[in-house]
Structure formats: C-alpha cells, structure tokens
Image (spheres, rainbow, N blue to C red):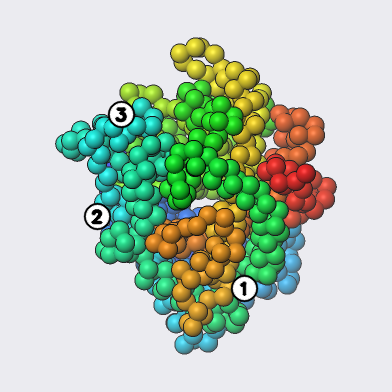
C-alpha cells in the first residue's frame, strides 16, 4: 500500500519515495471530490452530522496526507521528490480553489449558522471561520473573476515553492574553503573540527564552511579574521539573490508574489494587501499594527543607541576606525564577555542535548502532569527521535518527532508542524502527532551541546508543539493551532522561552560532563545579567522586519513596487545599524514570502505581549505552579481555535493584556 495512505499507523518513512507522492494525492482528491458532490446534493437542511462531519472527514484525510508529503520536502528534499512535490502542490491548490469557490457549500454554512441547530460555541466558531474562508477565496465573485482568482492562487503556490527552493539551493551551492589555519583564530574548536570533517568528506583540503546558521554564526561571532567575517556575512546576506547566483535569484519571485497578492486583494474589494490578510487576525488594520510597532520603537530606541555606543567604544580598542555590520556580532561577543565574563562557548558545555530534553520534559511533568518518553518509530533520518506523551492517568495525550540537527537538503530555521491533528468523528478518533524541527550543530563524535540561544529555540518550538498536542478540541478544523489567530499563535511558544532564564530550571537541566556538576549559580547569575544585553537593538531588529512587512503589503501598488526602497526607508526610520545597500535580506525572508507571516511578522512582538503578561501570573504564584499550569492548559493550550484568542487570554488572566510585562522582561522600562 502507498505509505502516505496508511491510516491505522504512522507512515514508514524508510520506504517513502518520490513516486508515492502523486498517486497518494490523486487518490485522496478524487475520493474527496466524490464526497463533496454528495454533500452538495443533499436536499435536507444542513446540520452538523449530515454536512459538517462529512466535510471535516475530507479535510482531515487530505490534511494528513499533505502534511506527510510537505514535511518530507522540508527535511529530505531531492530533485525527484521536489518535482513530484510541485506537481502535487499544483493539484492541491486547484482542489482548494474549487472547494473555496463552491457557492453551494458556502450557502449551506450560512444556513447552518442562521438556523443555529443546537450548535456549541466551538461549533459556531468553526462555521464562522469557514464562512470567512469562503469569502476570502472569492466565492462571491462572478464566474470570470473566479477563474482569474484561481489562476492567481495557482501562480502564488508555485512562486512560494520556488522562493523556498532558491534559498535551499543557494545555501547548498555555497562553500567557503579556508586553507590557512591562522584565519580560523578565535573560532571555537568544535566548529573548526566540524569544518575539517566536512572538508574531508568532500575530499577538499582545508576547512569547509557553509551558510547554514550553525556554520555561519560562530564565524561572524568569533573569527578574528575580519575578511573571513565579511566574506561569510556577504554570502549570508546575498543568498537567493543575483549577487550570489542569478540562477537562484528571488527578485522576480518577490515582485510577482506581491503583484498577484495585490490583484487578489483588488478582486475581493480590499484597498490593499494588508487589509485582506489582516481579516483573520487580532489586529484589525495596518494602522493599528504600525502604531503598535511605533510604540515599541519609541521604547527601544534610546536603549539601542546606547548599545551601539558601547560597540563603537570597544571597536576603537580593536583599531576599527569604522564599525561594519560584520563587526557587530564579533564586537558584541567581546563586549558581552567583558561585561558579564561569559561566552556562548563557556555556557554551551553545560547543555548536553539529553540533559536539556530531560529538563524540558520535567517542566511539563511539574506544571501539566505530563510524562514524556522516547519510543521506537520509523523516521526519515537516523538522528530523528520519536516520543509519546501520557498524562498522570497513563492515558496517551499525543506523540511527536524531534529532528534537531542541520544537514544538506533540509530547510533552514526551526518550526513545529502538524502530522496528525486531534479529531473525533462518530466511528473514528485520533490523538495528535507533531513534527518539531530545528537546525542545531550536528553531534561531533556522538556528542551534541546547545548554546543558550539554541535552548531557547528548542523551548520555543516545544511550546508550539504543546499547543498542538494538548488540545482538547475534537472538531478537526479548530483543534490544536488550527483556527487560532495568527498574531496569537506565538503565545505558547514565547511563553516557554521564559523558563530558560529560571535558576530552578537551569539547575535541573544543566550538566557539565567534565566536572559532573550543574551550572554554578555564579555563572547562571552572569547569564541572567546578560539576558537584556543589547535588547534595544534586538527589539529594533524585530520591529524593522515587522514594519517592512506591514508597509510592503499595505503600501504596495503597481506604481510603488520597489521593495528594496521600502526596506531602505524603514531602516532609516528604525535601525541604528548602517546596513550595506547590497544586503538582500528580503530575498530569503521566507516568513512573509512563502510562510504564513505576510502582513503578520508583527505577530512575534504582538504575541510576546500576551506571553509575557501570561507568564507574569506564574511569576506571582510560582513558575512551576500546578495551579497556574492547569489554568494555562485549560484556558489557552487546550482551547485551540474554538474561541477567539482574546477570549482565551481574558479567561486565563482575568483581563485584557498589558504591554508592561514585555517591557519589563526586556529591560525597556524604568
């Protein structure tokens, strides 16, 4: 049987091949289309059982198969698989375009909501979500415009895929070979050893570096050789642009993505792209988003200018007459060591990966009553682990795959994705399964250690995982993170980051294999003191990305399409760093051009207001409090998209969110 179509167990990833992709998608789409025709032809009044459940079954079947196919494309790409994936993407885009433009289904949803046949509040929320989704899919358009809408959606799915492929290909095709060992001075030994083993594997003399983040970051932070830092910065900043390789240039993709999104917004009667994309968010307008970001800029600017002043001060000691962007991480690391007497390398030796995982799982046990243990399952790579979660009554809650390390043909960054979502139909139900994916430095001689930033990343993605896995909503389309407003979806992930700064947590999960001890309290205090190091600059960096995103989509028109000029204007307004004109950051800004963050990158800071305020309750009554944990699980994590994020937050906190906790956590308040 096709491994993608197996439903009584998880797929055997070892046997999955590119030739399985199209038959699997084709089978599910054909079956779904038959089912939908039957649903459309039902004459009696639509109700939950005769209308919603059959449609939910269709959505779940296709969603599950597509999640498997999409995931393999992200973590184990190949030329043949990519070809099959893009063909399947075109098929699935056409399917959802047809589905979203079915006026019969749209009318039935509206009738069901109007007649309100004993629907629960969660069920009403699902129906309302679907009605909005139909309207944003062009269901009300005349036939000619509907066809145009479908063509545009098809173009956009291809462009998004091409955007990601260009980034991956430009990273895979770049190699920086260092032949002189003296050029490696300052770079940590484990990074140098890894570069040497990479070179040997490729039969190259010297040391081989890439622009995967685990390879790029140590050079830009630690390499004493200024030219080496500039070379790696240039490559990293120009990936997926003509300056690196015209074959993988994303300029056309960006322009076409914006052009087509603008055409969609006009077809639907919106004034701009952002107005269309914010329809399903907590924030109601680009003006509200810009106002929020402006407030953050005002709060952070003075602190950021002080941060830069400190860098200029230390730069003179190193003989730099002018501070360049490739000097800033290097000088920041020197400054951090001087101010707090710590380095990432010193901290890293206290975070062996297994200890970090045990510490993370212990938090979940203490505040949520969860027991997490590793078990056997087929995976797509030997380094991938598989876990099950049980509650105190030994009932299965969910399962997750953990894919931690960077490797060729794997998409960069870190993310959580749904493998299987919780649902309950009349004769079938399923527990949720998640993918948790990171790109940490691979183990060297079987040993893997994390920097503190990587520990934070792991906790962040695990927070997303808990949101998906701890849902108690059994309506498929609003379980887990589905149906949650995009600008609130980061709340559980950013909430978990707070634990990375707590002594009781660090004490529990840190361990130095040489000294056989946890991190000394004195060293932790230094780490804690460094928490808000350059927080002003870091805040402005996030504001810069978010403001660029919202301006790009709210101000775009065929006459105003120079995206690099928009970025330049934003930088002049917000940034305290003089970024070179050849820096092509937008060309790899996958969050907004191929991910779900178009007009929504502000979500990270918006949700951080929610998460900081939520965590302040734990700070008040105990960071590992079961009482607070049970309430957070009940009102936030378990609710999925069954009600608005604001309603969930108020149910948890007893009031609307305040920005105070965020500013305090970042040291941006008196």
Viewer-closest of 474 and 352: 352
Image side of residue 51 versus residue 68, left or right: right
Q: Residue furthest top?
A: 515
The mark that comes first in sequence, 1 or 3, is 3
The correct choice, above or below, for 362 with respect to 659 in the image is above
Q: Secondary structure at mark 3?
A: helix
Q: Which mark is residue 193?
A: 3
Residue at the spot x=39%, y=62% of the render?
Answer: 582
Q: Which mark is residue 187?
A: none
Tell me the distance, in whole angstroms, between the alpha carbons under discs 2 and 3.
33 Å
Tell me the distance, in whole angstroms, between the alpha carbons under discs 1 and 3.
50 Å
Instruction: Judge the density around disc 2: few (<14), some (14-19), many (≥20) Cα neighbours within 10 Å.
Output: few
Instruction: Judge the density around disc 3: few (<14), some (14-19), many (≥20) Cα neighbours within 10 Å.
Output: some
Q: Mark 2 and mark 1 in contact? Answer it, CB < 8 Å.
A: no
Closer to the observer: label 2 or label 3?
3
The mark that comes first in sequence, 2 or 1, is 2
The mark that comes first in sequence, 2 or 3, is 2
Residue 268 picture quarter: bottom right
Residue at the spot x=66%, y=73% of the render?
Answer: 110
Viewer-closest of 237 and 498: 237
Is residue 417 visible to the viewer in this orientation of the structure? Answer: yes
Is residue 195 visible to the viewer in this orientation of the structure? Answer: no
Residue that badge 1 annotates: 275
Q: Secondary structure at mark 2?
A: helix
Residue that badge 2 annotates: 80
Q: Secondary structure at mark 1?
A: helix
The correct choice, above or below, for 5 with respect to 224 in the image is below
Residue at the spot x=26%, y=63% of the render?
Answer: 247
| Residue 367 % position (x, y) | 69, 30
């Amino acid at each position: 049987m096709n491994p993608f179509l197996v439903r009584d167990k998880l797929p055997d990833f070892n046997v999955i091949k590119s030739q399985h992709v199209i038959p699997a998608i084709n089978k599910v789409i054909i079956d779904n289309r038959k089912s939908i025709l039957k649903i459309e032809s039902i004459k009696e009044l639509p109700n939950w059982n005769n209308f919603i459940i059959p449609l939910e079954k269709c959505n779940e079947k296709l969603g599950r198969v597509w999640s498997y196919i999409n995931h393999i494309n992200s973590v184990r790409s190949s030329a043949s698989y990519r070809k099959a994936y893009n063909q399947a993407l075109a098929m699935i885009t056409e399917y959802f375009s047809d589905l979203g433009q079915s006026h019969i289904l749209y009318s039935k949803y509206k009738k069901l909501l109007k007649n309100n046949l004993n629907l629960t509040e969660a069920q009403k929320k699902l129906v309302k979500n679907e009605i909005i989704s139909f309207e944003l899919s062009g269901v009300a358009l005349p036939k000619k415009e509907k066809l145009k809408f479908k063509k545009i959606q098809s173009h956009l799915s291809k462009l998004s895929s091409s955007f990601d492929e260009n980034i991956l290909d430009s990273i895979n095709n770049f190699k920086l070979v260092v032949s002189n060992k003296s050029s490696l001075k300052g770079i940590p030994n484990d990074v140098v050893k890894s570069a040497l083993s990479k070179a040997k594997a490729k039969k190259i003399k010297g040391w081989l570096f890439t622009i995967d983040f685990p390879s790029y970051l140590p050079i830009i932070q630690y390499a004493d050789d200024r030219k080496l830092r500039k070379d790696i910065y240039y490559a990293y900043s120009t990936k997926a642009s003509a300056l690196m390789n015209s074959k993988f240039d994303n300029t056309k993709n960006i322009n076409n993505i914006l052009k087509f999104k603008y055409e969609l917004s006009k077809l639907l009667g919106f004034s701009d792209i952002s107005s269309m994309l914010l329809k399903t968010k907590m924030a109601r307008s680009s003006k509200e988003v810009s106002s929020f970001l402006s407030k953050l800029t005002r709060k952070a600017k003075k602190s950021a200018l002080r941060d830069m002043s400190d860098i200029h001060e230390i730069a003179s000691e190193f003989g730099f007459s002018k501070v360049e962007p490739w000097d800033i991480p290097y000088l920041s690391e020197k400054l951090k060591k001087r101010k707090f007497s710590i380095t990432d390398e010193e901290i890293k030796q206290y975070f062996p990966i297994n200890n970090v995982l045990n510490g993370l799982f212990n938090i979940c046990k203490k505040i949520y009553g969860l027991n997490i243990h590793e078990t056997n399952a087929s995976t797509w790579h030997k380094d991938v682990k598989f876990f099950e979660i049980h509650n105190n009554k030994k009932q299965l809650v969910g399962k997750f795959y953990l894919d931690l390390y960077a490797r060729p043909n794997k998409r960069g960054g870190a993310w959580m994705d749904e493998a299987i979502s919780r649902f309950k139909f009349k004769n079938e139900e399923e527990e949720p399964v998640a993918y948790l994916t990171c790109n940490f430095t691979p183990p060297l001689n079987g040993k893997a250690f994390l920097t503190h930033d990587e520990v934070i990343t792991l906790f962040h993605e695990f927070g997303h995982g808990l949101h998906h896995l701890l849902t108690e909503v059994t309506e498929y389309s609003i379980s887990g993170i589905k149906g949650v407003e995009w600008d609130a979806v980061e709340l559980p992930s950013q909430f978990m980051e707070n634990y990375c700064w707590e002594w009781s947590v660090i004490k529990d999960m840190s361990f130095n294999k040489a000294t056989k001890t946890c991190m000394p309290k004195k060293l932790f205090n230094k780490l804690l003191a460094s928490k808000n190091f350059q927080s002003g600059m870091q805040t402005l960096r996030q504001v810069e990305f978010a403001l660029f995103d919202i301006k790009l989509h709210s101000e775009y028109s065929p006459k105003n399409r120079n995206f690099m000029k928009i970025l330049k204007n934003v930088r002049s307004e917000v940034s305290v760093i003089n970024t070179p004109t050849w820096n092509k950051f937008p060309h790899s800004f996958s969050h907004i051009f191929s991910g779900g963050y178009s007009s929504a990158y502000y979500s990270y800071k918006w949700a951080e207001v929610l998460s900081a305020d939520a965590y302040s309750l734990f700070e008040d009554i105990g960071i590992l409090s079961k009482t607070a944990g049970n309430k957070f699980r009940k009102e936030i994590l378990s609710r999925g998209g069954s009600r608005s994020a604001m309603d969930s937050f108020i149910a948890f906190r007893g009031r609307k969110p305040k920005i105070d906790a965020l500013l305090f956590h970042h040291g941006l308040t008196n």
